[in-house]
Image (cartoon, rainbow, N blue to C red):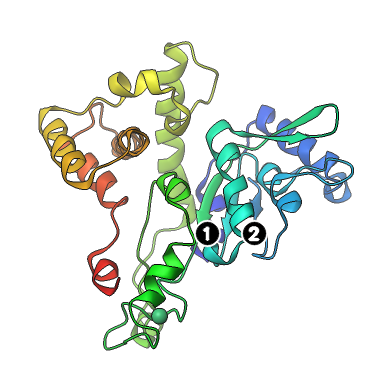
Amino acid sequence: MLAARLASILPALSPRELLEVSMVASIAGELSEGRLSDRRPFRAPHHSASMAAMVGGGVRARPGEVSLAHRGVLFLDEFPEFSPAVLDSLRQPIESGDSVIARANHRVTYPARFQLVAAMNPCRCGMAGEPGHVCARGARCVTDYQARISGPLMDRIDIRIDVPAVTAFDLIQPAPAERSQAVRARVEAARGRQARRFEALGLPPATLNAQMPAALVETVAAPDAAGTRLLHDAAEQMKFSARAYHRILKVARTLADLAGSERVGRAHLAEAISYRVVSENRQAAA
Ligand SMILES: [Zn+2]
């Protein structure tokens, strides 16, 4: 449900983005009754999806789900249940923002810049970490299931959150929540800051932190002294890859943008790092 709501807190498509999204939908024959909507796409393919369905292909080199989710959200539920080949094929579009389909004597390239959201159970039986539960298959229930997501793919996921089971009490007394509109206003403000910053640096319009070139990360997302110390300590202890290091800085930059802060501070970095580490109880279960 959270994933399906994500599109509603994202800014509307700009005219230029709308054109890109409509072009892909049109090639895929999915332009419903020729009507255009400025809502961002939300795609949720089933875990039985083939590689051609996911990244594009087939006889007519149709765009796949990664392209139909262009400028929107690609949601993969039951993440470890997708075939390893399909999961592996996601890495290229995640990195490059497009999907390349190789044919016998030519290549077709479709845009594929999407936000990936994936959901998974902690283990095969789905109960690891629940108070008092012991998996029938023991610790392997967790390790075998989580190992289905390869290290390189997991490394490309910037924000990881444990979602505890909803109790009956939560349903009876739902916590007060903000409306999507209010959250969207904050997202728009943060994206506006990013767009102005990157435009001043000569980058294409509407560039986001996630797309910032590696060479810019160290300057644009440079943390203050306390933040730098924290990041160095964490990098040493947790043995981050170079990619992870850069991605943590980008997430911290976004958190600072959401807070309206010019500098990336220690609190922004601490939050960004916390999104990357596996929770304590998950590790204990493993
Ligand atoms: Zn289990």
Q: Amino acid at mark 2?
A: Ala
Find the distance from the CA under tag 1 to the CA under tag 2: 9 Å
Foreground residue among 127 and 44: 127
Question: Residue at label 2?
Answer: 44
The image quadrant where one finds ligand 1 is bottom left
Residue at (38, 64) in percent of width and height: 177
* Vertical placement of residue 210 versus 168, above or below: above
Residue 103 placement (x, y as % from top left): 82, 34
* Vertical placement of residue 268 versus 276, above or below: above
Question: Residue at label 1?
Answer: 3
Residue at (32, 81) in percent of width and height: 130
In-image side of 58 versus 178 (left or right): right
Foreground residue among 263 and 144: 144
Disc 2 is placed on an element classified as loop
Question: How many C-alpha atoms fall within 10 Å of the one at disc 2: few (<14), some, or many (≥20)?
Answer: some
Residue mark closest to the camera, 1 vs 2: 2
Residue 283 placement (x, y as % from top left): 26, 66
Quarter of image, res 191: top left
Foreground residue among 233 and 140: 140
Quarter of image, res 129: bottom left
In-image side of 144 versus 238 (left or right): right
Q: Amino acid at mark 1?
A: Ala
Q: Give the mark, 1 or 2, whose residue is nearer the N terminus.
A: 1
* Vertical placement of residue 15 versus 63, above or below: above
The disc placed on residue 225 is: none
